[in-house]
Image (cartoon, grey):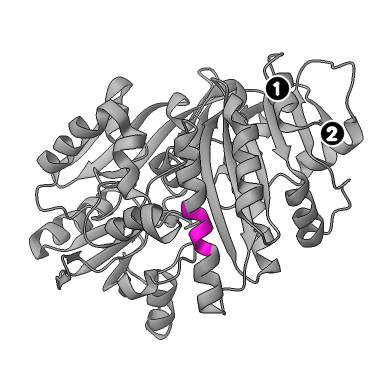
């Protein structure tokens, strides 16, 4: 545990105060991590939790840090501008990266730091493949995506990660337990606020011959076509995002609104060459941030029939170059990720651009949409996203973690930052 070379300590502490996001003013609320541990097994996780409990230290679990919702950021413990001096411990799970494949049951048993694409490559050698995975699969970890309740590639057919996990093991201050069925809701999407995921059993499937088709369609026609068949995955790139993609990825895609469908079915129309090119470049959409340099992003999940109006509203609101991609999800929904390149070195201009993310969220909510995930930045929206489960899960959190030591301020709003975001949606963006 904690065997980070002494010479790298200051650099490590700084890096662990960041994830892929870059929200203005948030740095004023961040603190350096006091101690960083890289456990190699479940027993060491429990040792860290025992020590944290004795010292009254807060504990933040971290995987690869590829999410942009602030779920792994060490935040100063602030309540009405009163600062707490509680120690902050970070558990970096990336050394717990083993996994085992059960071919007969088509299940992969994963340690929390296992990387999705490492699993996929091993599965492929056995004629198997993941049912779903994130667009950051080459680097993101299993527990990180579960803790965010992600949707992504394959979610059109198989739903979100909650529908593809059969069981997890979780460590908290009371010990280790296995959780399955309806009790998964207390942990999936909770950013480690209710326990540290130490193992997960994830469903996989047999490899199938897949075809990729591209169509140049407006969003209302694209949404209709997606749900006419039993397709595996569908990705929509609006014209603005295709332009950003060509600049940042070095691609030469036609700069038009484009739908890509991945399917085992044969379709009578569609450009297969273009469809395959889009499929092969599906990873790391946030690479467009280098155009800023920097990026303001907004990700919201909307009913398919609301997406055309939502995109139109975004085009009216955002004056600078921007683009959106949509991964369609089971149940006629779409996860819309909008990108606005902006120079984060120019603080005022970047802050003004960042408010567009709040405006996008407010617009989505008016159209029956919800934020993609919570973390720190959108903890004020936890009642909206968790719906009828909110009070039950909050009471569960209080019961197993009465001192609020497990990743405080994430998912369940606490301190000044949720107030800033809530007020920002109502006032700053008018």
Residue 216's tag is: 2
The image quadrant that residue 371 belongs to is top left
Range shown magenta: 354-358
Q: Nearer the viewer, residue 214 or 98?
A: 214
**Dot 1, crowdedness within 10 Å: few (<14), some or many (≥20)?**
many
Residue occupying image coordinates x 54% and y 71%: 350
Please determine whether, in this image, residue 386 is positioned above or below residue 7. Answer: above
Please determine whether, in this image, residue 381 is positioned above or below residue 66. Answer: above
Q: Which element is circle 1 on?
A: helix
Q: Position of residue 369 (x, y in %)?
A: 47, 34
Q: Nearer the viewer, residue 128 or 29?
A: 29
Confirm whether residue 306 shows in the render: yes
Q: Position of residue 277 (x, y in %)?
A: 84, 42
Is 39 contained in the magenta span?
no
Magenta span: chief secondary structure: helix
The image quadrant that residue 47 belongs to is bottom left
Residue occupying image coordinates x 27% and y 57%: 419
Tag 1 near tag 2, CB within 8 Å: no
Residue occupying image coordinates x 33% and y 53%: 422
**Cα distance between the residues tagged 1 and 2:** 13 Å
Which quadrant does the N terminus fall into?
bottom left
Residue 226's tag is: 1
Residue 39's tag is: none
Please determine whether, in this image, residue 215 is positioned above or below residue 249. Answer: above
Q: Nearer the viewer, residue 200 or 62?
A: 62
Q: Earlier in the sequence, mark 1 or mark 2?
A: 2
Which quadrant does the C terminus fall into?
bottom left
């Amino acid at each position: 545990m904690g065997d980070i070379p002494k010479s790298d300590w200051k650099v490590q502490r700084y890096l662990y105060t960041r994830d892929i996001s870059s929200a203005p003013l948030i740095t004023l609320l961040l603190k350096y991590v006091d101690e960083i541990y890289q456990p190699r097994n479940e027993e060491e996780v429990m040792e860290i939790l025992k020590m944290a409990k004795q010292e009254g230290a807060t504990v933040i679990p971290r995987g690869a840090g590829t999410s942009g919702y602030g779920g792994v950021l060490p935040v100063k413990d602030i309540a009405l501008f009163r600062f707490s001096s509680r120690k902050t411990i970070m558990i970096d799970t990336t050394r717990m990266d083993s996994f085992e494949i059960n071919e007969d049951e088509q299940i992969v048993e994963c340690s929390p730091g296992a990387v999705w694409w490492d699993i996929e490559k091993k599965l492929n050698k056995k004629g198997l493949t993941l049912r779903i995975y994130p667009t950051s699969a080459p680097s993101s970890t299993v527990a990180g995506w579960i803790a965010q309740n992600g949707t992504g590639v394959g979610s059109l057919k198989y739903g979100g990660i909650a529908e593809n996990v059969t069981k997890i093991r979780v460590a908290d201050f009371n010990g280790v337990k296995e959780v399955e069925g309806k009790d998964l809701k207390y942990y999936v999407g909770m950013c480690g606020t209710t326990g540290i995921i130490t193992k997960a059993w994830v469903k996989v499937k047999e490899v199938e011959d897949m075809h990729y088709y591209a169509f140049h369609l407006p969003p209302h026609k694209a949404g209709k076509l997606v749900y006419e068949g039993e397709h595996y995955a569908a990705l929509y790139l609006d014209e603005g995002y295709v332009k950003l993609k060509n600049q940042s990825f070095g691609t030469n895609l036609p700069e038009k609104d484009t739908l890509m469908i991945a399917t085992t079915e044969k379709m009578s129309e569609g450009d297969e060459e273009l469809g395959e090119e889009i499929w092969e470049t599906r990873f790391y959409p946030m690479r467009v941030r280098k155009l800023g340099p920097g990026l303001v992003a907004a990700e919201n999940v909307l009913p398919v029939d609301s997406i055309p109006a939502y995109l139109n509203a975004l085009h009216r609101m955002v004056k600078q170059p921007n683009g959106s991609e949509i991964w369609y999800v089971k149940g006629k929904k779409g996860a819309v990720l909008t990108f606005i390149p902006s120079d984060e070195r120019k603080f005022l201009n970047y802050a003004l651009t960042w408010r567009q993310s709040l405006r996008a969220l407010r617009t989505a909510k008016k159209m029956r949409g919800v934020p993609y995930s919570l973390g720190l930045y959108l903890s004020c929206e936890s009642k909206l996203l968790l719906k009828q489960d909110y009070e039950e899960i909050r009471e569960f959190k209080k019961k197993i973690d009465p001192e609020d030591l497990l990743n405080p301020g994430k998912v369940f709003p606490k301190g000044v930052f949720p107030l800033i975001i809530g007020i920002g949606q109502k006032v700053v963006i008018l």
